[in-house]
């Protein structure tokens, strides 16, 4: 992309993010627009926007649903990944959602937009509480995002979705929160050596641009990049979503994701 082309795409992506409330992390309604309104507690969100976020690349027809509903495993171990029991279209996207018992709200969702974008929204599963401190679950976040990016790799080829793309990561409610839910070998919040690094800001918004959608290996690198962003936001140089001891050292800790729940 030339600088002029990049500016045009950025203006288009920003326009698409506006109704989703993914512009200003200081705003009270940050991250609360669009499908995230259906989450019981909007906590984390991943959004990928294609070159033309106003286009209608995908039809939710009879050929679409068997592909959308097919069982999927994580991109490394192949173990089952559960997104939710509700699979249906909305005005703007096809969703896999996890409805909460006795509620109209969702606990999480995966959505593929008609425009060819993909979105993940996470509620309670992205955080936990320990001794009065709220923790964002690092391995859980990276694992969910990685699975969504890998599924999107399939969608890009199947529906001929054109780039470049913008990748946006958003976290809400980070003030006073810390990171937890680390990979094997790292001390967690129940360990005497663990010292949390509380966030000061209310929210986090990070973004990058990709000119060609990556293959499986590059998707893995992108997922690690997202994990690194989260660590950076808490001022940590480590990459605690990677196992740091034993024969699996340096690998992502899929065992601690529990994505089949």
Image: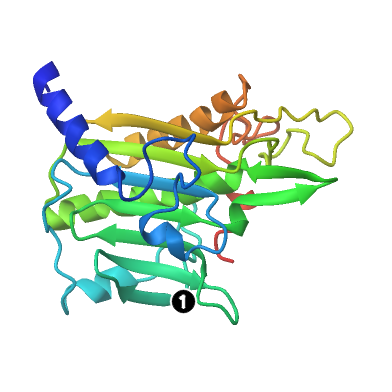
Residue at image coords 85%, 45%: 131
Residue most toward the right?
192
Camera-side residue: 28 or 261? 28
Residue most toward the front?
28
What is the x, y in percent for residue 230? 54, 32
Camera-side residue: 195 or 173? 173
Q: Is residue 116 above or below residue 237?
A: below
Residue most toward the bottom?
102
Camera-side residue: 74 or 63? 63
Residue at image coords 39%, 54%: 33
**Which residue corresponds to mark 1?**
85
Tell me which corner region of the image, top left, top right, bottom left or bottom right, holds residue 101: bottom right
Tell me which corner region of the image, top left, top right, bottom left or bottom right, holds residue 58: bottom left
Q: On the picture, is 131 further left or further right than 231? A: right
What is the x, y in percent for residue 104? 50, 76
The quadrant of the image that shows the N terminus is top left
Coloration mode: rainbow
What is the x, y in percent for residue 246? 70, 33
Q: Is residue 163 above or below residue 62?
A: above
Number of labels in the image equals: 1
The quadrant of the image that shows the C terminus is bottom right
Camera-side residue: 245 or 96? 96
Residue 46 visible, this angle:
yes
Residue at image coords 51%, 28%: 228
Secondary structure beneath label 1 = loop
Residue 257 visible, this angle:
no
What is the x, y in percent for residue 63? 16, 75
Q: On the picture, is 5 further left or further right than 200? A: left
Residue at image coords 26%, 76%: 66
Mark 1 burial class by Cα count in 10 Å: few <14, some 14-19, many 20+: few
């Amino acid at each position: 992309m030339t600088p002029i082309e990049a500016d045009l795409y950025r203006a288009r992506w920003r326009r698409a993010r506006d109704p989703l409330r993914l512009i200003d992390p200081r705003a009270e309604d940050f991250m609360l627009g669009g499908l995230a309104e259906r989450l019981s507690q909007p906590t984390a969100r991943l959004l990928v926007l294609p070159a033309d976020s106003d286009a209608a690349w995908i039809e939710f027809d009879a050929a679409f649903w068997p592909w959308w509903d097919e069982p999927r495993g994580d991109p490394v171990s192949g173990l089952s990944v559960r997104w939710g029991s509700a699979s249906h279209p909305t005005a703007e996207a096809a969703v896999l959602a996890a409805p909460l018992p006795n509620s109209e709200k969702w606990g999480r969702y995966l959505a593929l937009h008609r425009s060819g974008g993909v979105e993940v929204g996470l509620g309670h599963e992205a955080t936990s509480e320990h001794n009065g401190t709220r923790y964002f679950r690092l391995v859980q976040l990276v694992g969910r995002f990685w699975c969504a990016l890998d599924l999107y790799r399939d969608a890009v080829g199947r529906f001929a979705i054109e780039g470049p793309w913008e990748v946006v990561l958003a976290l809400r409610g980070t003030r006073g929160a810390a990171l937890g839910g680390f990979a094997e070998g790292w001390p967690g919040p129940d360990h005497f050596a663990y010292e949390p690094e509380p966030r000061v800001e209310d929210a986090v918004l990070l973004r990058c641009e990709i000119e060609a959608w990556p293959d499986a290996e590059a998707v893995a690198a992108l997922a690690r990049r997202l994990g690194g962003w989260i660590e950076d936001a808490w001022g940590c140089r480590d990459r605690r979503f990677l196992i740091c001891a034993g024969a699996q050292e340096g690998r992502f800790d899929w065992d601690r994701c529990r994505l089949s729940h």
